[in-house]
Amino acid sequence: MAKVDIILVKNVEGLGAESDEVTVAAGYARNYLIPYGLAVPSTMATKRQREVLRKRREEREAHERDQARVLDESLKNLIVMVRVKSGEDGRLFGSVTSQDIANSLKKDYELELDRHKIKLPNPIKELGDHEVEVHLHHDFHSRLQVKVLPEND
């Protein structure tokens, strides 16, 4: 099986990040990575482009890290109120999901947070206070206080 060297133009899950030079199967590069604009063949000309991509990647990652640090500080002080339908015994009709928490953050605090960053070990199925982990960046993990209240309160 033939292998080729390519330079990634965008992050590819399980393969590498932008500006990485990797060796992959020729068919994978020819049929998927290069046509979809995810990579370019590794030549002398594209090696110069690699340095530009590397600098752009470093700047973007620094910016993302700074944003995550600021968001981490603001989330530590928040308590998110989620109102849901519940029965007499405090059990919910359904469960509270990461999407519900993200919607409450947006509605109450005008804070946009991707639901995939909110990690629930198990769906929340009871009223009360819960602590949820939020993965903001691979360097920053924060905790968010979630208070689940009955809708008719």
Image: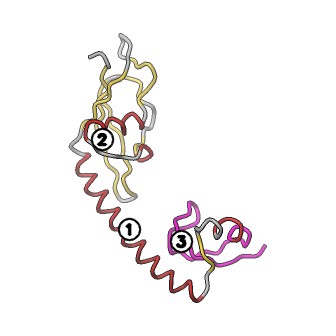
| Position of residue 133 measured from the top left corner of the image (x, y, whole percent) | 36, 43
Q: State how far apart marks 2 and 1 are (Cα).
A: 26 Å
Q: Residue at x 23, y 51 (%)?
A: 73
Q: Residue at x 46, y 22 (%)?
A: 94
User: What number is the disc on residue 144?
Assistant: 2
* 28 on left or right of 70: right
Tell me if mark 1 has few (under 14), some (14-19) or many (20+) residues whose alpha carbon lies within 10 angstroms of its own.
few
Where is mark 3, residue-wise? 9
Which amino acid type is marked by label 2?
A: Leu
Q: Residue furthest bottom?
A: 44
Marks 3 and 1 close (CB-CB < 8 Å): no
Sequence-wise, the earlier of marks 2 and 1 is 1
- The span from disc 2 to disc 3 (Cα, nearest Å) is 35 Å
Q: Is residue 5 magenta?
A: yes
Q: Is residue 150 above or below residue 121?
A: above
* Residue at 60% across, 76% down: 40
**Type of amino acid at the residue the image marks with label 1:** Arg
Element type where label 1 sits in the image: helix
Kind of element beneath mark 3: loop
Q: Which residues are magenta?
A: 1-29
Residue 78, by quadrant, is top left
Q: Which residue is mark 1?
A: 60
Q: Can you name the residue that lies furthest to the right here?
A: 1
Q: Quadrant of the C terminus?
A: top left
Which of the two discs, 3 and 1, labels the residue nearer the N terminus?
3
Placement of the N terminus among the 4 image quadrants? bottom right
Residue 83, image x and y in percent?
32, 25
With respect to residue 77, does 15 lie above or below?
A: below
